[in-house]
Image (cartoon, rainbow, N blue to C red):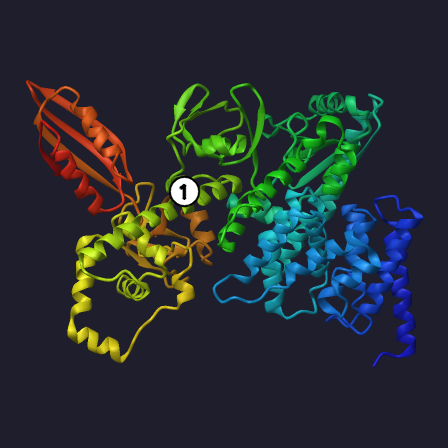
């Protein structure tokens, strides 16, 4: 029971928090804006009046705190501040979206509706709820990017106030934060919030590590401050001589980034030397920004030895987040490396506020630069159908934290791509149609494989062909969400087309076996072949995995009286809703290793107990052969850091759909146009690709070797029979 005194104290606390919210707003608020925000506050206070947080404080302090982050740290305007105040009203109270629309207008109601939709998901045992949650959140970008921004602010305040929660809930929320919210904050340019989310995430997921690094930083605080102060004083002295208007800030690197560097380079805390960052923020007219940045660079490098390998020019080529700055690493006093960031006031605001400042400063030709380009591309990806939320989030996340490289088109246009991108990623970045018909690529005038990893400065020419289309192997090396979404979409449609053809083949073959083509037969076939959907069945008939021999076994099985007796007694049927799904599933039954997809002996590691379909890797042990670990295994980080040379790439495949290499030896009498006939037969056989061809002729007798990629032996046998019919071919032997 709350006393009258406590109520008065809490009301005073709420009023103080509200005044701070208005005072600290990044945007200038008009009288109308303040009226709109006050109305939102009154609604939120009324809605949450009987609610308290786990800590015991009034619940209304949470939406006010979120609104404060939105107003001050992110810098959004009145509509966003009002929406932040109301973000939990529909989800947690009796108010409806219609109520908010009539009271606060369409814009605010729409933002709150987006925030509410994220949380209003029905549990589905076949779907990762959290992945679906993330997917739904990202889909709101199609309507209003402010939804995500407010959601990040909400998550930040929750992370700041998690101490009263149970340990397991802390770990869950912190893990989600590190997995998606921190990368998202990074991607929309909110670097300060990203850093805080990372540090708080580490605090709750690896508490001991966090507190250990925090203690080491605090123990070194005095010497750090002394070092930073001495460097700042020297820097100010040199810059004042040039009559520049500037400010200099110094700070140690974050706990999370320190931890990340320790893990990635296998270093101790004492071995990390670049633990400091200096920021020079200068005043400048827009047309002088670049000139002054390089002038400051020249002054700094005149007095401090630069590391030429650590120069980063994001003024000439801004990051896709909109971030602009000049980064250099120099040798400071006492032989310590220092990172110096050179930014104009405009660049600094964009780096601090991200999305809000980006749109504040956009003008002229900058309309489509940086962040907005990324947002437009993201919308494209989000519009692609993707039934698997886990895959969607995984692909999307790959692009959130990825470092950028800068490459050139044949015409010299500069393009930004994530580090690790391939020519196929580049092709889809240019245009979907170019990506869909990519046949090859030239890098700096030289033909390279499509799996080639692009480097900054590469000039790329894409070779296209109307007869070329994406194939499943592309998914092994493309990394951008746009490319993966388009390739998957094409492959799904391609599989459906094969399934349509397979359905007619199956109908014909069942007729030959005098078996009726109906729902009951399809159900029995699915049970017999251990498949999930009718589309699965048709597809496998279409590619030849289920051939005449297997269908005859099914027919014999059905006619067996003993089998039928028990079948009548205990009928087994498939759920019609599952059978009729337009989905071709993978039956992961085989593990392959390396680029060549070799079959090796292996054991499943008991520490993480991987199962078929999991993302895994192989570890070559000293005495126990290859052990299989999940990518998220607790020991994965240690193994990859310390024994990288013993790591073997591994993946689960569906052996019925997977391609394998077949080598053929052809012998016979040489004839004009023989090689052309051989290649024509192979190319007209469905789902068979030529890897290499070599023919030798000697005194009228030829010997040829052909290496092929083929889905199954049925297709291979069919093609061998066709090759043997060619005039001049005597024998075709599989090596």
Q: Secondary structure at mark 1?
A: helix
Measuring from the top left, give residue 202's x and y in whole percent: 61, 56
Quadrant of the frame with the N terminus: bottom right
Measuring from the top left, give residue 577's x and y in whole percent: 43, 65
Residue 166 left/right relative to 441: right
Task: Please state the total of marks drawn on the protein image.
Answer: 1
Measuring from the top left, give residue 666's x and y in whole percent: 12, 31
Residue 417 left/right relative to 304: left
Viewer-nearest residue: 723 or 453:
723
Residue 735 visible in the picture: no
The residue at 41%/34% (across/down) is 451
Viewer-nearest residue: 439 or 297:
439
Toward which corner of the image does residue 306 lie, by quadrant? top right
Measuring from the top left, give residue 636's x and y in whole percent: 44, 54
Local crowd at mark 1 within 10 Å, few (<14), some, or many (≥20)? few
Q: Measured along the vertical axis of the image, is residue 521 above or below residue 359?
A: below
Quadrant of the frame with the C terminus: top left
Residue 219 left/right relative to 75: left
Q: Measured along the vertical axis of the image, is residue 59 above or below residue 710?
A: below
Viewer-nearest residue: 705 or 490:
490
Q: Which residue is mark 1?
A: 476
């Amino acid at each position: 029971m709350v006393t009258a005194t406590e109520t008065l104290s809490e009301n005073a606390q709420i009023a103080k928090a509200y005044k701070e919210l208005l005072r600290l707003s990044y945007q200038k608020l008009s009288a109308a804006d303040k009226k709109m925000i006050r109305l939102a506050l009154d609604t939120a206070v009324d809605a949450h009046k009987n609610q308290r947080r786990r800590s015991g404080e009034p619940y209304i302090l949470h939406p006010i705190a979120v609104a404060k982050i939105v107003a001050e740290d992110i810098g959004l305007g009145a509509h966003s501040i009002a929406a932040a105040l109301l973000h939990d009203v529909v989800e947690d109270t009796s108010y409806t979206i219609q109520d908010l629309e009539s009271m606060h207008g369409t814009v605010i109601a729409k933002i709150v509706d987006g925030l509410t939709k994220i949380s209003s998901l029905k549990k589905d045992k076949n779907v990762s709820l959290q992945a679906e949650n993330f997917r739904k959140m990202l889909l709101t970008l199609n309507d209003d990017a402010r939804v995500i921004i407010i959601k990040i602010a909400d998550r930040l305040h929750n992370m700041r106030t998690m101490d009263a929660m149970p340990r397991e809930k802390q770990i869950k929320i912190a893990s989600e934060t590190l997995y998606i919210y921190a990368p998202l904050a990074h991607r929309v340019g909110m670097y300060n919030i990203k850093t805080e989310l990372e540090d708080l995430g580490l605090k709750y997921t690896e508490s001991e590590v966090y507190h250990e690094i925090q203690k080491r930083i605090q123990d070194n605080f005095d010497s750090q401050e002394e070092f930073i102060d001495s460097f700042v004083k020297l820097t100010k002295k040199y810059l004042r001589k040039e009559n520049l208007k500037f400010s200099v800030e110094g700070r140690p690197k974050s706990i999370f980034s320190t931890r990340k560097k320790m893990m990635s380079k296998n270093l101790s805390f004492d071995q990390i030397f670049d633990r400091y960052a200096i920021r020079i923020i200068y005043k400048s007219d827009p047309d002088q920004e670049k000139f002054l940045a390089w002038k400051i660079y020249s002054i700094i490098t005149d007095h401090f030895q630069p590391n030429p390998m650590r120069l980063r020019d994001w003024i000439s080529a801004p990051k896709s987040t909109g971030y602009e700055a000049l980064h250099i690493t120099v040798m400071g006093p006492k032989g310590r490396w220092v990172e110096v960031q050179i930014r104009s006031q405009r660049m600094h605001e964009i780096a601090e506020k991200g999305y809000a400042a980006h749109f504040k400063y956009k003008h002229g030709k900058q309309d489509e630069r940086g962040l907005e380009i990324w947002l437009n591309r993201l919308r494209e990806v989000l519009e692609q159908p993707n039934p698997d939320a886990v895959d969607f989030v995984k692909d999307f996340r790959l692009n959130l934290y990825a470092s950028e490289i800068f490459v050139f088109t044949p015409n010299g246009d500069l393009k930004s791509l994530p580090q690790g991108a391939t020519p196929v990623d580049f092709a889809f970045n240019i245009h979907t149609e170019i990506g869909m018909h990519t046949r090859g690529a030239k890098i700096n005038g030289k033909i390279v494989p499509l799996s080639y990893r692009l480097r900054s400065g590469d000039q790329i020419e894409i070779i296209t062909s109307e007869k070329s289309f994406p194939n499943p192997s592309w998914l092994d090396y493309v990394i951008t969400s746009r490319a993966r979404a388009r390739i998957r979409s094409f492959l799904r449609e391609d599989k459906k087309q094969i399934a349509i053809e397979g359905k007619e083949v199956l109908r014909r073959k069942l007729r030959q076996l005098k078996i009726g083509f109906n729902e009951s037969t399809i159900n029995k076939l699915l049970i017999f072949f251990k498949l999930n959907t009718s589309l699965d069945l048709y597809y496998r008939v279409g590619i030849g995995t289920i051939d005449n021999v297997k269908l005859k076994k099914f027919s014999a099985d059905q006619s067996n009286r003993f089998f039928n007796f028990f079948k009548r007694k205990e009928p087994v049927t498939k759920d019609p809703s599952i059978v009729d799904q337009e989905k071709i599933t993978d039956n992961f039954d085989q593990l392959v290793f390396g680029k060549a997809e070799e079959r090796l002996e292996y054991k499943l590691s008991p520490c993480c107990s991987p199962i078929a379909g999991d993302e895994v890797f192989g570890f070559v042990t000293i005495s126990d052969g290859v052990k299989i670990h999940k990518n998220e295994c607790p020991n994965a980080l240690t193994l990859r850091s310390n024994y990288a040379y013993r790591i073997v790439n591994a993946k689960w495949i569906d052996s019925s759909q997977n391609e394998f290499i077949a080598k053929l030896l052809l012998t016979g009498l040489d004839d004009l146009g023989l090689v052309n006939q051989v290649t024509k037969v192979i190319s007209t056989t469905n789902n068979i690709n030529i890897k290499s061809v070599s023919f030798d002729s000697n005194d009228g007798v030829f010997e040829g070797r052909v290496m092929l990629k083929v889905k199954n032996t049925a297709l291979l046998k069919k093609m061998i029979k066709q090759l043997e019919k060619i005039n001049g071919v005597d024998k075709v032997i599989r090596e």
